Amino acid sequence: MPTCRRLTADGGRVSLPLPLPLGRHEVALVGLTPVADETPPWWDEWRLPGRAAA
């Protein structure tokens, strides 16, 4: 089942925990796509509707 998640690079490296089920012939395909952060500097996720105030 494919999944997507955001990971933050630290010094050009990403740590990805990848537990595999027990078995001798397990294989996993991992694709990483770099994304440029285009978030405006004024954005605050607490402005999202339905989000409780801090």
Image (cartoon, rainbow, N blue to C red):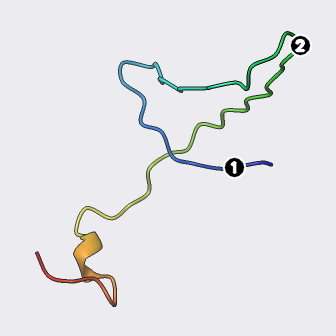
- Name the residue nearer the viewer: 17 or 6: 17
- Residue at 64 percent across and 50 percent down: it is 4
Ranked by sequence position, the earlier of labels 1 and 2 is 1
How far apart, in angstroms, are the residues tagged by discs 1 and 2?
21 Å
Residue at the right extreme of this rendering: 25
Query: In x, y percent, where is residue 43?
Result: 27, 70
- Residue at 51 percent across and 46 percent down: it is 6
Query: In x, y percent, where is residue 27?
Result: 84, 20
Residue at the left extreme of this rendering: 54
Label 2 environment density (alpha carbons within 10 Å; few <14, some 14–19, many ≥20): few
The amino acid type of the residue labelled 2 equals His
- Name the residue nearer the viewer: 28 or 45: 28
Residue at the bottom extreme of this rendering: 49
Would you say residue 7 is visible in this rendering?
yes
Q: Which residue is mark 2?
A: 25
Residue at the front extreme of this rendering: 22
Label 1 environment density (alpha carbons within 10 Å; few <14, some 14–19, many ≥20): few
Secondary-structure class at tag 2: loop
Query: In x, y percent, where is residue 54?
Result: 10, 75
Q: Quadrant of residue 10?
A: top left
Determine whether, in the image, residue 18 is placed left or right of residue 48. right
Determine whether, in the image, residue 27 is placed left or right of residue 52. right
Vertical relation: 29 (above or below) 8: above
Vertical relation: 23 (above or below) 44: above
Which mark, residue 3? 1
Query: In x, y percent, where is residue 41?
Result: 25, 61
